[in-house]
Amino acid sequence: MKRSKEVIAGLLVLALWFIPASALAAKKPSKGITFLNDVEKVEWYRVHGKHIIIGWKGLPEDFYHWNYKAALNASKATLYKVHVWSVRYSQKSWSPGEGGQICITTAHMGRFGKTNCKK
């Protein structure tokens, strides 16, 4: 009986050792992008795993900035690589990889990755 308790305690210590603290601290990407509710030309947005899809009804002058901010905030919340896909608002059923997007922006752990959005 004592031996089994030692084994269980040892396994628990090993499990905690191998689970990175960042995985425990990670949140949902939607927590970091609620500011999009207040952006005038954003018609809708949704989270699809580690992808954020934003439906734009027209493009604002600071379009690049909003994509950049969404990518950084979502990656800070999740601590993983995040892709922000900008599409037209009429592409409601669009999913990543289908093509026809306006642009893509990436960020990882709060650091900007790359984008093909024009400034």
Image (cartoon, rainbow, N blue to C red):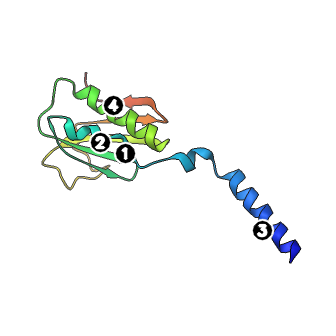
Say which quadrant the N terminus sits in: bottom right
Work out how far the residue at label 2 is from the one at label 4, CA to CA, in angstroms.
11 Å
Q: Nearer the viewer, residue 66 or 115?
A: 66
Residue occupied by mark 2: 34
Residue occupied by mark 4: 69
Residue 113: image location, x then y, percent: 43, 30
Residue 19: image location, x then y, percent: 64, 52
Disc 2 vs disc 1: Cβ atoms closer than 8 Å? yes
Name which residue type carries label 4. Answer: Lys
Q: Secondary structure at mark 1?
A: helix
Mark 2 and mark 4 lie on one chain; the one further toward the N terminus is: 2
Q: Residue at x 32, y 40 (%)?
A: 33
Q: Secondary structure at mark 2?
A: helix
Residue occupied by mark 1: 31
Q: Residue at x 26, y 27 (%)?
A: 64
Residue occupied by mark 3: 8
Q: Residue at x 36, y 36 (%)?
A: 71
Q: Secondary structure at mark 4?
A: helix
Residue 106: image location, x then y, percent: 39, 35
Name which residue type carries label 3. Answer: Ile
Work out how far the residue at label 4 is from the one at label 1, CA to CA, in angstroms.
13 Å
Tag in front: 4 or 1: 1
